[in-house]
Amino acid sequence: MSEQPLFNQLQRFGLNKQALTQVKTDGVWFHCASVGEVVTATPLIRALMKSKPDLQITVTTMTTTGSDRAKAEFGDTVAHCYLPFDLPIFVTPLLRRLKPRRLVIIEVELWPNLIRSCVCHGIAVDIVNARMTERSAARYTKFALLYTPMLHALSHVYAQGKRDAEGYLKLGLDPAKLTLSNNLKFDRDLSAHNQQTAWLGWHDVGERSVVVGGSTHSPEEALLLKAVSKLSDVLLVLVPRYPERFDEVEELIKTSGLKWQKLSESQHLQANTQVLLVDEMGRLMECYAHSAIAFVGGSIAERGGHNALEPASLGLPILMGPSRFNNPGICQVLSDVGAIKDVSDDADVTRHLTQWLQFPDRAKELGNKGLSVIKENQGALNITLTSMLNELD
């Protein structure tokens, strides 16, 4: 269960003593902004804990959902608190409490005061699975006086792709501090969804083909509803990205005229149900595991596209819009083998769904090509872990 908002806010001001009462010093601190970064870091943290079982691991997040995910993954085996605001007066108490050997930042959360404070306290700072989007590079260039010293202060950067590595080099990072590790997300065992939370209603799907809209934003739900309304024997499963949008999406479904159910209020699927609204967090992989086709959200809504590896790891063919700047390398390799097809409107979605539902063997073939690409690109975990262990010894 999530903490009370007041407790969260106190930690943002550096008042984290209650959350860290049993924490040992001289450990490794992982900062994961939210759910996605926690998921990415999980295999690395588990591997590090296995290699060094006595090492204290602390995870900070910035969102309640990220905190919940960290606790679900690790329970009490790691310490957790919220990252303080990026001012020395708030950051310093946390550094003095943890006294970590290293701070490991996952992907792209670069905070100037945090990094500078770590350097002042003799704490090494690594960026793991580092991303450098065009937006980030432009911002760092614009505020070079602020960010250039921060980049020089980094101990090591493990870039998730060639574009990201080149971005750091262009900003002045010492090449000796850079490793092209490739993407840690390829090394996740994404197929191991939690069977204990499996919904009973999956047994009642029958002959319907399940299409999942994963991590959706507005207007993606409306687009998918319009596309599915033109098809028969299809169950559309909508999984909005943020829980605060559950009510909004529910109202949208009501106006569509389609027969629908809400997961939190349903034990079984009705035979005529056309839309299932997943109004609970942490169920996306379960939904993908029971589906035939996936749409990955945030890609038409211009949010950069969410994690295409999740459905790809289950051998699903994928539909995505043009916005993919969060993980361009992953999306590109999946697109190159046909595992991702481009869509921009409901007509595109309807066209691809019709083809794949009419020729399911072809759809499965494309999905399997995506799965093969994932296996071919694995290895970042071993590269990153080996280097980190060398630094810790």
Image (spheres, rainbow, N blue to C red):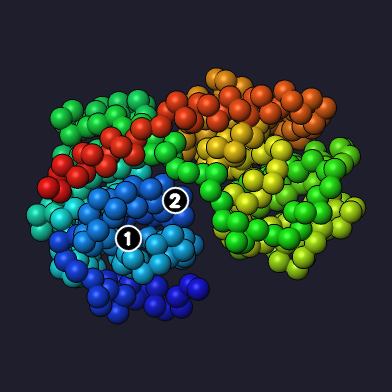
Q: Is 18 positioned to the left or the right of 117 in the image?
A: right
Picture coordinates of residue 192, whole percent (x, y):
53, 48
Picture coordinates of residue 225, whole percent (x, y):
79, 45
Residue nearest the viewer, comparing 389 with 173: 389
Q: Which comes sooner in the sequence, label 2 or label 1?
A: 2
Up/down of 112 relative to 147, above or below:
below
- Residue under the point 26% across and 27% down: 170
Q: Which label is found at residue 59?
A: 1
Residue nearest the viewer, comparing 105 with 137: 105
Residue nearest the viewer, comparing 283 with 175: 283
- Residue under the point 45% across and 75% down: 3
Q: Which label is found at residue 181?
A: none
Residue 196 in which image quadrant: bottom right
Up/down of 55 relative to 361, above or below:
below
Q: Disc 2 vs disc 1: Cβ atoms closer than 8 Å?
A: no
Up/down of 246 relative to 353, above or below:
below
Q: How many marks?
A: 2
Up/down of 371 relative to 338, above or below:
below
Q: Could you classify mark 1 by the number of other residues whose Cα lies within 10 Å: few (under 14), some (14-19), or many (20 or more)? A: many
Picture coordinates of residue 298, whole percent (x, y):
58, 43
Q: Could you classify mark 2 by the number of other residues whose Cα lies within 10 Å: few (under 14), some (14-19), or many (20 or more)? A: some
Residue nearest the viewer, comparing 80 with 164: 80
Residue 322 in which image quadrant: top right
Q: CA distance from mark 2 to mark 1?
A: 12 Å
Residue type beneath disc 2: Val
Q: Secondary structure at mark 2?
A: helix
Q: Is 276 positioned to the left or the right of 365 in the image?
A: right
Picture coordinates of residue 155, whole percent (x, y):
16, 42
Q: Secondary structure at mark 1?
A: strand
Q: Is residue 15 visible?
A: no
- Residue under the point 29% across and 29% down: 180
Which residue lies under the disc numbered 2? Answer: 39
